[in-house]
Amino acid sequence: MTKKITLVYPILRSFVKSDIKIFEAHGYEIFKLQSFPDKKLWGFFKNRVIELLVLPFYILKSKVVFSWFNDYHSFLPILISKLLFKKSVIIVGGYDAIVDNKNQHGVFYNSGMRALIAKLNYRLVSEVWVVHKSLEYGCSFAKKEYNIISGVRSFISKKGIKIKEINTGYDSRFWNYNKSSKKSGILTAAFFYEERVINIKGLKIFNKLASLLPEIDFTIVGESGIKISDYINIEKNVKVLGVMNKYQMKELYQNSKFYFQGSRLEGLPNSLCEAMLCGCIPIGSRVFGIPDAIGDTGILFDSDKNLDRVVQFINSDFGSHDFKKARKRIKNQFHISLRSKKIKENI
């Protein structure tokens, strides 16, 4: 008999697709259910009705129920799995373990129904998997520098909650270093669909860095539904592009010399790890999983107040050894096979 699991998620991101491939590789048939975030009341209730109609059937036949992120979409899967004596797992990626008051961001930002549901989910679920350990205990630097409260244990008093660090993993065969590419410029990428994301991902710092290095090309990827220039006075040497597919992103990574991750909050940044596999030298803020991803292969900065060090670093001499070193770091520490192995051991 084929083994089965249920997987619920809000948006089919690359890391969700990656986990689907891992589950399938381990011989599991997957009942997939997407509950796309909808701020309209009718859309919210439509999602819950669909969940009520299909989840009992899915979960009854499943060994484990997985929810990527903790939010409204997690409640019914976890509750039904509890009633049916099935194992359930929440995979925490970032916003479900933080409060960023400045940007009004995080599932626990308001102490309303959403936060109550999220806390109840953490109490009911069998296990919590965090993509980086800072999402369990919190990031002290983010608290000190940005007053960001973080870590699942910061919001849950239940002592017996079982939390495991299972890092996201990256495919080094697809995200590869092209030795023939002549690398130049500095790249950053995200889904920039609102002002809040611009602030969270550190685009103002990126733009300030560009002003200090006018002879170098800077590229922002991921403008979606807004114009970034409406919120930032973009420097002349900064180019803004829309959302790219993974093949286009690979080419951009391979042709870029540096990748910039200036976030004020993160889990383990996918774009940073992908860029490093493609030979980008990393520049990142000292928060959450960013320092663990970068290690000794690039440079960390504390805020926009110490960018002079970053400028000096960028103006240093780099060659293929440095590009390969960044790639080797991710390949050794966060390869897709390592996540696959941990999932198999913990499923």
Image: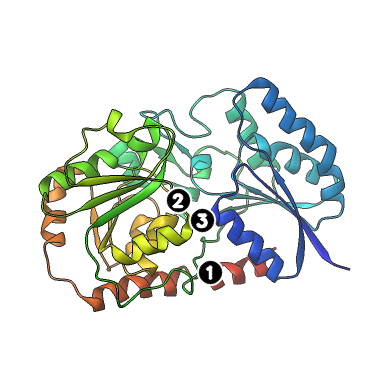
Residue 205, quarter of the rendered image = top left
Question: In screen coordinates, is 343 left or right of 189?
Answer: right
Give the Cα distance between marks 1 and 2: 16 Å
Which residue position is annotated with label 3? 131
Q: Residue 29: image x %, image y %?
A: 78, 62
Circle 3: is it few (<14), some (14-19), or many (20+) Cα within 10 Å?
many
Which residue position is annotated with label 1? 336
Earlier-in-chain disc, 3 versus 2: 3
Q: Residue 11: image x %, image y %?
A: 59, 44
Residues tagged 1 and 2 counted as in contact (Cβ below 8 A): no
286 relative to 305, above or below = below
Give the Cα distance between marks 3 and 1: 13 Å
Query: As rendered, which of 248 and 301 lies closer to the eye?
Result: 248
91 relative to 294, above or below = above
Give the foreground label among 1 and 2: 1
Q: Quadrant of the N terminus?
A: bottom right
Residues tagged 3 and 2 counted as in contact (Cβ below 8 A): yes
Q: Is residue 262 visible?
A: yes
Q: Residue type at mark 1?
A: Ile
Residue 342, quarter of the rendered image = bottom right
User: Which residue appears at 16% of the width and 60% of the height?
Assistant: 314
Earlier-in-chain disc, 3 versus 1: 3
Which residue position is annotated with label 2? 267
User: Which residue appears at 15% of the width and 47% of the height?
Assistant: 306
Secondary structure under the numbered disc 2 in the rendered image: loop
Query: As rendered, which of 231 and 59 lies closer to the eye?
Result: 231
Q: Residue 130: image x %, image y %?
A: 54, 53
Secondary structure under the numbered disc 1 in the rendered image: helix
